[in-house]
Amino acid sequence: MAEFSLISEPPLAGVEFEFGGIKVHAPENLAIVSIALPLGGEADAEKAINAAFGEALPDPGRSVVCKDGSRLVRLSPDQAFVMFTHETPDAEPFIEQRLKGKAYTTDQTDVWVGLVVEGSQSRAALERICPIDLHDAAFAIDDAARTVMEHLGVLIIRTGANAFLLLSASSSADSFLHAIQLSARNVS
């Protein structure tokens, strides 16, 4: 009998391409954990987040890079994501321990796929498929928004002047990748 060994791998692992002034790659070992603030315990949860990451939870629609390199993204008044590089499949217990039980945590790593889109033409490529205004005055560095690109739900975070982190459902990873590739190709 043949012996097989299964290895867990994100759907877009190893994706990397460049068209003109646009570079796209899938971040390696991206862990995503949701943080929900408990009703009546919001203040304690926010203190725990600040103690764990050295940064206050940003306002909804904003993100912040923490001293340890992780990124806190506030999605709504009572929900946030923490994104960080983590090689092993224990991201949620790692964050839960840091928050000392003051917030609810759920591992979202396998639910999402990520793409980093950067370069001088990155905004032009994304504006073709994203209905929100990505101009500097409307969508600043560290802003975050839920939107759609083509027919797919996407969380977009502006990480630099010409850099964006995009997250979409892992169940539609190929369609998400195709939309980004096609738009990048069309503007280059």
Image (cartoon, rainbow, N blue to C red):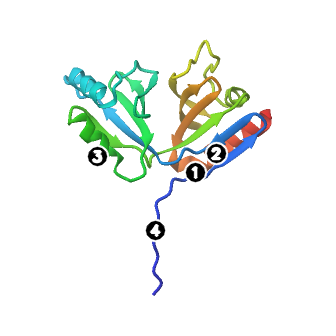
Q: Which residue is mark 4?
A: 6
Kind of residue at disc 4 = Leu
Q: Earlier in the sequence, mark 3 or mark 2?
A: 3
Q: Are marks 3 and 2 in contact (CB under 8 Å)?
A: no
Q: Is residue 163 left or right of residue 67?
A: right
Kind of residue at disc 1 = Leu
Kind of residue at disc 3 = Pro
Kind of residue at disc 2 = Leu
Instruction: Give the label, 1 or 2, closer to the camera.
Output: 1
Separation of disc 1 and disc 3 at Cα?
24 Å
Horizontal and vertical percent position of residue 123: 68, 26
Decide which of 85, 181 is in the foreground and name it. 85
Q: Which residue is mark 2?
A: 177
Q: Quadrant of residue 63?
A: top left
**Residue drawn where x is 39% and y is 53% of the image:** 88
Horizontal and vertical percent position of residue 10: 51, 53
Instruction: Give the label, 3 or 2, closer to the camera.
Output: 3
Q: Earlier in the sequence, mark 1 or mark 4?
A: 4
Instruction: Give the label, 2 or 4, closer to the camera.
Output: 4
- Quarter of the image with the C terminus in it: top right
Separation of disc 3 and disc 2 at Cα?
30 Å
Q: Secondary structure at mark 2?
A: helix
**Residue drawn where x is 29% and y is 28% of the image:** 49
Q: Earlier in the sequence, mark 1 or mark 3?
A: 1
- Quarter of the image with the N terminus in it: bottom left
Q: Is residue 135 left or right of residue 156?
A: right
Q: Are marks 1 and 2 in contact (CB under 8 Å)?
A: yes
Q: Secondary structure at mark 1?
A: loop
Decide which of 133, 19 is in the foreground and name it. 19
Q: Secondary structure at mark 4?
A: loop
Q: Which residue is mark 3?
A: 93
Label 2 crowding class (10 Å Cα cut-off): few <14, some 14-19, many 20+? some
